[in-house]
Amino acid sequence: MGPAESTAERVGAQAADDARVEAALLGEHLPAVIDTARAGRRLSRADLDACRRQGAAAAEQGVAVSAVLDLYLSATWRLWGDIQRRAPRSSPAVVAAVAATLFRAADDAAEALAEGYEQAQRRTVRFEESLRREFVDDLLSGTAEPGLLQERAARFGFNLAGSHVVAVARGDRRLVDAGPVHGRVETHVLATFGGRDVVVATKEGLLVCVFPSTARDPAADLARRLEETGEGPWRIGVGRPNSGAGGVARSYGEARQSLDLADRAEVAGPVARFEDLVAYRMLAADPGLAAELVDGVLGPLQSARGGAQHLIETLEAHFAASGNLSATARALHLSPRAVVYRLERIAKLTGHSPQDPESRFILELAVRSRRLAPTPEPAPDTAAATTTGKNPARPKKS
């Protein structure tokens, strides 16, 4: 016994009305189920592959997975209704066998449908991630073909014509896309800006955030969110606002430069802004000038008893304490009198008093430039240089 093939079209149409989707998503499922009911077997691998394809098609068409499952299950119980109408002409054992076959087919089909639907969604997500990564790379490089960049920007709701500022954050480990830090920051940023005209991504282990330049101090907000992750410490470099398709790339380059300069110069605070680092940028652009400044200003300290290091450390502590003698003394574990003595000694040797604003600026710039100046090469060993492949000659005993 079993339903006739002629019922498949009618059942499919009624099930489609129930689920409010197109009957075409059933494919050849109903004839396959009728065959299984007659033969008392399960759906074949080919039948299940067809269900997976229909599940994927539903996902690609934007049909909800609940709707496509409703379509298939509605078709199943309507087929069962046809069987019940024929039941009086068949034995109970036959009816039970057909019912078991029918509902097992429904279960297998539902599993295959859901699997195909999920696979299609994963493919779509991977494709979108790939497109987004290409867009971010093109946006930050500034070398992309304008038409293609504009097309991708429109896809992700990014206004290329607007003005944007880029912040780049570095922690104590490399960050990756979809990692916990990236995910947490992206969720916050997208919620704050309505998901438009912002980018949150990772590049070369760094977290990169692109904000509209109209945003109110987004770097400070980013610093707070990163602090909440429990990781770090964090350093954030911020570029200047720039307009147009190439503006993001320029701001990104400035943010990277700010990050590196702040690390090298050990600038205080987690946020380093490009416009605030102008002095360091000038020195970094001419390492010879930085070396000249260090040697010219701090060089005379080498003549102090015990060398220059303890006096330089005193300057660093004094600057970090904003010129407060008591705080400087506590940081160095010295008495205020000892600190005053050292500062007077520095003024005498260098000709620049830490108490004078202009001299203080020169001294602080020289101290910070020590990290930007090139490290001098060690002097060659004269004896070793004159003996190739041999041990240096021992001095003769007198």
Image (cartoon, rainbow, N blue to C red):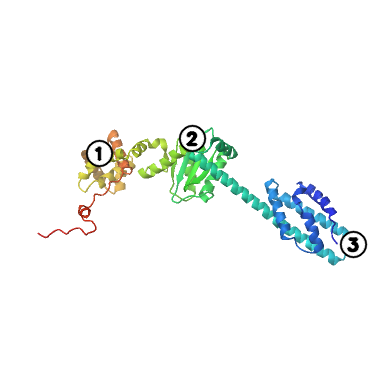
Question: Which structural element holds mark 1?
Answer: helix
Specify whether 29 is left or right of 319.
right
How crowded pointer 3 is (Cα within 10 Å; few <14, some 14-19, many 20+) is rated as: few
Write the residue at 14% across / 58% down.
395
Determine whether 49 is above or below 208 in the image. Answer: below
Q: Which residue is mark 1?
A: 296
Question: Which residue occupies 30% across, 36% down?
Answer: 361
Relative to 398, is 225 above or below? above
Describe residue 202's horizontal placement relative to residue 363 as left or right.
Answer: right
Amino acid on which the number 3 mark rests in the picture: Pro
Q: Amino acid at mark 2?
A: Gly
Residue 355 percent coordinates (x, y): 27, 36
Residue topped by disc 3: 88
Q: CA–CA distance between discs 3 and 1?
A: 110 Å
Question: Where residue 348 sits in the image (x, y, percent)?
Answer: 21, 39
Task: Point out the tag, 2 or 3, that comes first from the N-terminus.
Answer: 3
Name the element at disc 3: helix
Mark 1–mark 2 Cα distance, whole angstroms, equals: 39 Å
Q: Quadrant of the N terminus?
A: bottom right
Q: Earlier in the sequence, mark 1 or mark 2?
A: 2
